[in-house]
Amino acid sequence: MAYNKINYYKRIIEIQELTLKLHNFKNMYYKEIYWQHIEPKYHISYRTFHEYLGIPAARELKKLNAKKPQAPSFFDDCKHEHTHKKSISSHTNCETTAIFCLDCGRQLSQPKTDC
Ligand SMILES: [Zn+2]
């Protein structure tokens, strides 16, 4: 559903940009732009075209993108089946290690220092 909305706003932005460009640089009227460029390509009604021009699509798209989870859901599902011991820091005689997941990279254990 969110994916469809993203495509919907992307299409509106595309139409808005094209319309503004033709209007500002070629001094075309909205009606001309609609019949020569929008209708043949997007197959929307003139009413819908007018509606699209009034939608703050860029702002809505930004909101949708901000809602996306930071990390892929794959990381949340990780069972940490493949682990390895990694050295975090080592001094002359002491080494600090912890267990890390090989799949998602998360640290799974408290750091342990061996001297
Ligand atoms: Zn993991």
Image (tube, rainbow, N blue to C red):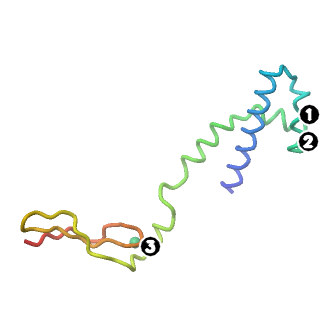
Q: Is mark 3 within 8 Å of ligand 1?
A: yes
Where does the image place residue 64, in percent across and percent down from the top left?
60, 47
Q: Position of residue 110 (x, y in %)?
A: 22, 69
Q: Which mark is residue 36?
A: 1
Q: Residues within 10 Å of mark 2 (few under 14, many from 20)?
A: few
Q: Residue at x 18, y 63 (%)?
A: 89
Q: Is 18 displayed left or right of 64 in the figure?
A: right
Question: What secondary structure is found at the residue carrying circle 2?
Answer: helix
Q: Which residue is mark 3?
A: 78
The residue at 17%/70% (across/down) is: 112
Above or below: residue 39 compared with residue 6: above
Would you name the residue on which mark 2 appears? 40
Q: Amino acid at mark 3?
A: Cys
Q: What amino acid type is highlighted by mark number 1?
A: Gln
Q: CA distance from mark 2 to mark 1?
A: 7 Å
Viewer-proximal residue among 90 and 47: 90
